[in-house]
Image (cartoon, grey):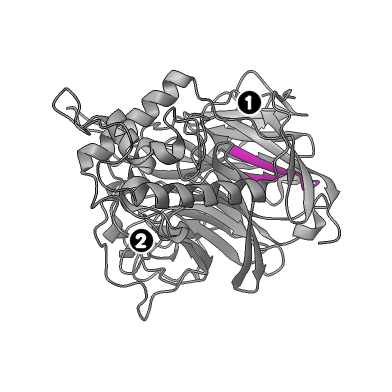
Amino acid sequence: MYNKRSSRIMPAVILAGVILSGVSMLILSCRNQPEGSGGSGLSARGSGNGPDGAALYVQYCATCHGTDLRGGNAQSLLDGVWQFGDGYGYVRRNIEFGIPHLGMPSYDDVLSGDEINALVEFLYAEQEKAGAVKPDPSPTLETMDYVISAEIWADDLEIPWAIVFLDEDTALVTERPGTLRMVVKGDLLEDPVKGTPEVLHEGQGGLLDVNIDPDYRKNRWIYLSYSHAIEKGSGDERPPAMTRIVRGRISNMEWVDEQVIYQAPHDTYRTTRHHYGNRIVFDKKGYLYFSIGDRGAQDQAQDPARPNGKIHRIRPDGSIPADNPFMKEGLPTLYTLGNRNPQGLSVHPETDQVWEAEHGPLGGDEINIIRKGVNYGWPVITYGRNYNGTAITEHTAMEGYAQPVMYWKPSTAVCGIEFYQGEAFPAWKNKLLVGALKYEDVRLLTVAEDRVMHEEVILKNFGRVRDVGLDLAGNIYVVVNQPDRVIRLSPIRERVGQ
């Protein structure tokens, strides 16, 4: 177990609300300053050929964030916390396009692209100088229903991607570079499982999801998904790759009995290195569902002859159900079309419906209920735009294409999802836990039939949330990147008198 260094107590919902309001105040104040104000008289041009990020900061940001970046009317920029995405591209787009629903306007008509780049570079350079480190989770958090304990359950991982519990004491965690780690009674074993498949760890590819067979106690089957590359021939071209799924068993910390249960036709593999998907789930009928992202070829999400941009359905042994909807017009494993990059799948414990979360582009992250033969529209309809701000399509709805149950604009970078089951948090029964990479949070969605009735942030700003899992008792495990660890949430007490 990990001894926490922090003793702060900050309710997760209050934390999010305080910072959101602070950002709105910051941007409205700074945005409304007359051009050239800021008190320094410095030009936004540096002594070299490019813009001066420090001068731009003084001119547009210092009034709210402080001349030393340590906060004032708005929060510090040196505390390691980025509310709306920690990453050069995220910060740049937030400045350029704003966050309108929070009152943060865009700066694309005030600052040039080079000036925005210079400002972002300055902010990150100052964070590095200050040694800014993302804070550990507070040991105690408050939600609307519970006071909960948050502890670092497994640390010093390498880009952890997914988690599943084999029994009450043992969990498996995938690391994207290609290793499968085991945690036993809260202790991360030093050596990974030997003999797991070789993965292509480039871009967003690598070892991805892990899940266990519904009859795992009897057959011991474990399922892995990963980016699989075709061995390249002569020349310097990149080998094409696609998402692949295998199953195997673990014996004495070694991967054995491997079977390939899904592999796309090799002529559909792509040399791109992003949007692999992938999640693996099972419904009560025993079907296995898995997702593949569009692999950066958005129009192929509408092509039933291509595996990418789809949800697939097979049986656990890889055989194909005879009633799959695209048997005659496309690949037999296909179950849906038009899914951009689904990195979340979960099955409702009572209705047995498969729910899906998929990344939109700039805006338009979605939650969908996955139904047989349905087209979810990407890229014909979307609530998002290209990353440069231009339109993908003028349509957000059209006949023949399903609307999402819920969408986020701007994008939270929605990722792993899990319907809550267990005894630890009974008030959350059948609610949907939703992770987000960009916004670095876990949200709890109250679901009624095919609608989302309420949304609450229960954890925020302790890493990019890649996956959310449960142990057999119903304690919650949050897989995060940057820092690379697993955070365990367990109940302290139920709140009363709300």
Q: Dot 1: what SS?
A: loop
Q: Which residue is drawn at 47% across and 33% down?
A: 77
Instruction: Give the residue type that dot 2 points to.
Output: Gly
Query: Which sits in the foreground, 414 or 269?
Result: 414
The circle drawn on residue 141 is: none
Q: Earlier in the sequence, mark 1 or mark 2?
A: 1
The reply to whether dot 1 and dot 2 touch (C-beta < 8 Å) is: no
Q: From the image, tell me which residue sits under label 2.
A: 384
Mark 1 surroundings within 10 Å by alpha-carbon count, few (fewer than 14), some (14 through 19), many (20 or more): some
Q: From the image, tell me which residue sits under label 1.
A: 155
Q: Position of residue 415 (x, y in %)?
A: 51, 49
Instruction: Give the residue type that dot 1 points to.
Output: Asp
Q: Where is residue 129 in the image (x, y as percent from the top left)?
A: 43, 19
In the rendered structure, which segment of residues is drawn in magenta? 468-479
Q: Dot 2: what SS?
A: loop
Query: Which sits in the foreground, 359 or 226?
Result: 359
